[in-house]
Amino acid sequence: MRKLFLLALLASAAPAVAAPPARPPEPQRPAELPPEITDGRMIDQLGSMVGALTRAFLDLPVGELEAAVENRPVTREDKRRTVRTVTGTDERELAAGIEESKGAVKAGGQAVARALPVIREALNKAGDEIERATANLPQPGYPRR
């Protein structure tokens, strides 16, 4: 990524990049995702957090807002209306959907972790190709004859 950023700067034709400084070699790091992304316990915890946020969202009062939008006085019925009552959402169905999606999230994290070395290699190759392609471009500060 750093190579691509530097190449974009070089291609911008700014006088400040007439003589780019020498870059130290990039340290080689293992192509790994943070363990939190592929850890099943973290996914379970996130699922619980999503469930709690969903319940809080369903309990948000919306009747008074609806009355304000309609430019009418707030009624007693408006004060009792929530997202849950307006949408008719069943909390059990939502919880089941969240539970089902945990497996897909886990599998997605593992797929990204497996593909990361290939993605990194492809980006490095693309950066090298761009570097070779732009190596002979004239520098903006180079004197013209």
Image (tube, rainbow, N blue to C red):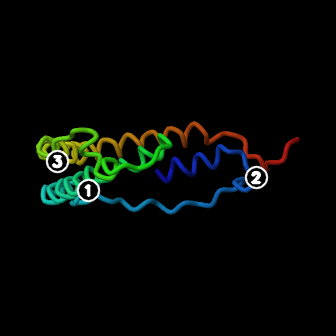
Percent x, y of residue 68: 47, 47
* Residue type for callout 2: Pro
Q: Earlier in the sequence, mark 2 or mark 3?
A: 2
Q: Nearer the viewer, residue 82 or 9?
A: 82
Depth-wise, is mark 3 or mark 1 nearer the camera? 1
Residue 51 appears in the rendering: yes
Q: Kindly identify which residue carries mark 2.
A: 15
Residue at the spot 72% in from the left edge and 53% down from the top edge: 18
Establish if 21 lies above or below 10.
below
Percent x, y of residue 37: 23, 55
**Residue count near mark 1 (Cα–Cα under 10 Å), binned few <14, some 14–19, many ≥20:** few
Q: Kindly identify which residue carries mark 1.
A: 56
Q: Earlier in the sequence, mark 1 or mark 2?
A: 2
* Residue type for callout 3: Lys
Q: Quadrant of residue 84?
A: top left
Percent x, y of residue 121: 35, 44
**Element class at badge 2:** helix
* Residue type for callout 1: Ala
Percent x, y of residue 106: 16, 47
Quadrant that contains the C terminus: top right
- Separation (CA) of disc 1 from disc 2: 55 Å
Depth-wise, is mark 1 or mark 2 nearer the camera? 1
- Separation (CA) of disc 2 from disc 3: 48 Å
**Element class at badge 3:** helix
